[in-house]
Image (cartoon, coloured by chain):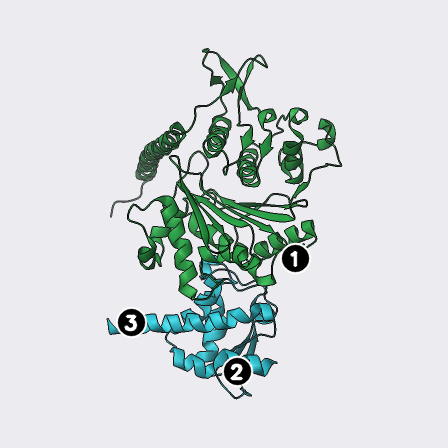
Chain colours: A green, B cyan
Amino acid sequence: MKRLTPRFRRWLLMRQRHSRHRAEAVAATSNVRAWARRRASFMATRARLPAIRYDYVTYPGYGAFIPPTDLSFARNYDETLAFILDFRRLFFERRLYKFPDGERRKIYADFARIETIDAGAGLVLAAEIDRFVKSRPVRHEVHDHLWHEAVREFFFEAGLFDLLKIDPQTVGFNENPSSIRKTIRLRSGRTKSGTDALGLRSEIEALSGKSIAARPHAYTAIAEALANVGHAYPSWFRSWPWKASGRWWALGFWDQPRNTVGLQLYDQGAGIPATLPKQQHWPRLFPFLEPERKASGLIKAGLEYGRTSTGQPGRGMGLAEMADWIETSGSGFLRILSGDGEVTYRPGARLDRRDFDAPFCGTLIEWEVVLDA
Amino acid sequence: MLHSVAHLSSGKSFSMPDAVHISIARQFSETPFGRYLEDGKESGQAFREKILLPLLNEGRSVVISLDGVAGLPSSFWEEALGGSVRAGIAADRLRELLVIETTEADLETYVRLGWRYIDQAEVKRQTNQSH
């Protein structure tokens, strides 16, 4: 063995350092390529949606990207998703944006253009704001005095002003909102326990002052949906620009005039149509699959397999268990928007389906139930 | 009341005086959640491996009480009971040793579902063996 002289020791350390640097350089190149591929995939999805709309006239030096007046995946899928993806990309990249007139300006989202915001789209927007604010923990500027009352009240009740570190007093917010729809505060987590499901049910019951279902049905529906978030972020899944977080976000509402409660659960994962074929029970879904294998068909197959596997009316497994709350209450709907497809379930196992050109950014599950008078 | 529900749940017409009583809500969790251990410590696999199987493997009779749980997600309940069959305890043996009971009307459906999961797992086990 060669003697470890001081010179030989220095040489060994240098060689170790060089080989580490080489490995880091290779990894960095590979990371850059992977990053570029994920960005290209994101931009390809965005290209299938309506073009971005700007306003760079109203405030000199600034340019706005404009949301649809009706922010709703149910009524206005393409424009709503386009705005959400723009929000994600433009605020992440955070550079001066080059507008069609060739000038570069600071960019902002013109929330004053939103007239109506439905619960599902509100939750997805809230999740985007949550991730953006947590990645940029500084004070953000919000001109909420220009917003429509319903949008401002949604932000207030969902706790988004707190997320943005905005004191509603300083922006002239009315402390006695007159809205007919009350919203619970945004909740988020990486569930490994049923207490989150119980907490969500309890919060909506506290808001409405009523029981929202026979005790086990709402709990099992929510718990099964939260447990599915575990499958939503498989190890192979990568996202852009944010890394896969493993998180879920939830909101709920109580609409007194309609005597209706709603609960929305969202994750930014790979989506049910992508993850279902990799699950253990996939071969048992074959009898329910259609030859064309559309995304909505995959979700529908998951629901139908779950419904038939127990052989008991009103009792399902997995996805179908989420529908049991609707089935037993005899009213409302369950809507699952995931990947390129959407399935809406109504009592009596009535299903409506839609497929889209551009895939949704994760999975959004919405329940709406009309309560007993 | 308990005896009548126990009768419904196991098909037995006699009580089980030496049975070990397990209340899921009191001894495990009021909010059972998830299928596998990776889903958390309130999962069906955790219940089966930590509580149910050690007793069944000793040949002890077990009475599972569902009272007090917020609900029993199918992933939890199937893994706890169907998983016991997959772990090597035949459905017939489970019928000898196990009683599932509840005094709450809302939870009675889970008694029937539990036995259904056991029967389905048994059918699948026998199908796999014959192949």
Q: Which residue is mark 2?
A: B7
- Which class describes the residues within 10 Å of circle 2: few (<14), some (14-19), or many (20+)? some
Going by the numbered disc 3, the residue's amino acid type is Thr
Quick one: label 3 or label 2, which is nearer the N terminus? 2
Disc 3 to disc 2, how far (Cα)?
29 Å
Disc 1 to disc 3, how far (Cα)?
44 Å
Question: What residue is at 34 percent from the left and 56 percent from the top?
Answer: A285
Question: What residue is at 46 percent from the left and 57 percent from the top?
Answer: A320
Q: Which residue is mark 3?
A: B127
Going by the numbered disc 2, the residue's amino acid type is His
> Tag 3, which secondary structure?
helix
| Chain at tag 2 | B
In this view, B67 is above or below A44:
below
Viewer-side residue, A76 vs A227: A76
In this view, A210 is above or below A58:
below
- Which class describes the residues within 10 Å of circle 1: few (<14), some (14-19), or many (20+)? some
Residue A266: tell me if it is visible: yes
| Chain at tag 3 | B
Classify residue A337 as left or right of residue A28.
Answer: right
Classify residue A78 as left or right of residue B105.
Answer: left
Q: Which residue is mark 1?
A: A211
> Tag 2, which secondary structure?
helix
Viewer-side residue, A161 vs A328: A328
Label disc, if present, on residue A72 of the rendered structure:
none
